[in-house]
Amino acid sequence: MIALAECYLNRCIAQEVLQFLNAPSRIHHNPKLGRDKILKKIKGYIEKFPSEKFILFIDFEKGINRIYVEKNIANPLHVFGGKIIVGRFLKGNNVLIVVFDPYPEEVFKITSLISDPRIARSLKSGKACDIIKSKPGIYEQVKEASEVIADTIKSIYSKLGNNTKSTANSMF
């Protein structure tokens, strides 16, 4: 299983989700690879690793930027108070997508942390996980949401059909 994360904060959440899935996995994150690039490059990843399962961790954003995600997610399931959407990405049967609506900063109510410029910069860096883990209330929310996301992913894989079902059962 390969997870692709749009930003450092999404990468941190992806790590937690993958721990709950207890599946062999790796996370790809590149600071230059934003949401739109991930959504466009997934086809190349699928071609390079055709037998892999993928999970994309992206932000929904606000305004017109939401349209592309809305058009490309099948059977969206709204979890964690409707602020996180999990579904199958239409451009690949082996691709699931986790969308934070509109951003994980708002989902987990950490916008107050962003008012401190040092912390705001750190959330956009490799220190994002350290910051989240240092804030017990926020970290508990992230862990709770990660477990819900993992359970939803398991449920989706179990419903996708015989080939995916056997793979999903062996992965979890």
Image: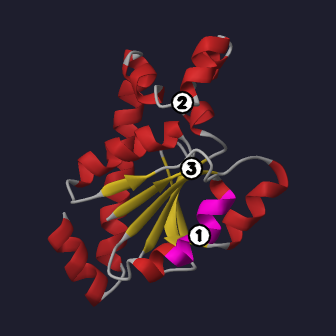
Left or right, 152 with respect to 23, comes to right
Q: Amino acid at mark 2?
A: Ser
Q: Is residue 85 above or below residue 158?
A: above
- 58 or 50, nearer to the observer: 50
Q: Residue furthest bottom?
A: 162
Left or right, 102 with respect to 30, comes to right
Query: To which quarter of the image does residue 41 belong?
Result: bottom right
Tell me where the magenta segment starts and ends, as one range.
36-44
Closest to the camera, between mark 3 and mark 1, is 1
Q: Residue at x 41, y 58 (%)?
A: 3
Residue 122 in picture, x, y percent from top left: 55, 22
Mark 3 and mark 1: Cα distance apart in space: 12 Å
Residue 161 in picture, x, y percent from top left: 32, 86
- 65 or 24, nearer to the observer: 24
Q: Which residue is mark 1?
A: 41
Can residue 53 be seen here?
yes
Q: Which residue is mark 3?
A: 6
Q: Residue furthest right?
A: 64
Q: Is residue 15 above or below residue 72?
A: above
Task: Specify the principal SS of the magenta part.
Answer: helix
Q: Which residue is mark 2?
A: 125
Of the 4 image quadrants, the one containing the N terminus is bottom left
Q: Earlier in the sequence, mark 2 or mark 1?
A: 1
Q: How many C-alpha atoms fall within 10 Å of the one at disc 2: few (<14), some, or many (≥20)?
A: some
Q: Amino acid at mark 3?
A: Glu
As for residue 43 lying within the magenta part, the answer is yes
Q: Residue at x 54, y 71 (%)?
A: 42
Q: Amino acid at mark 1?
A: Lys
Q: Residue at x 41, y 67 (%)?
A: 54
The kind of secondary structure element at disc 2 is loop
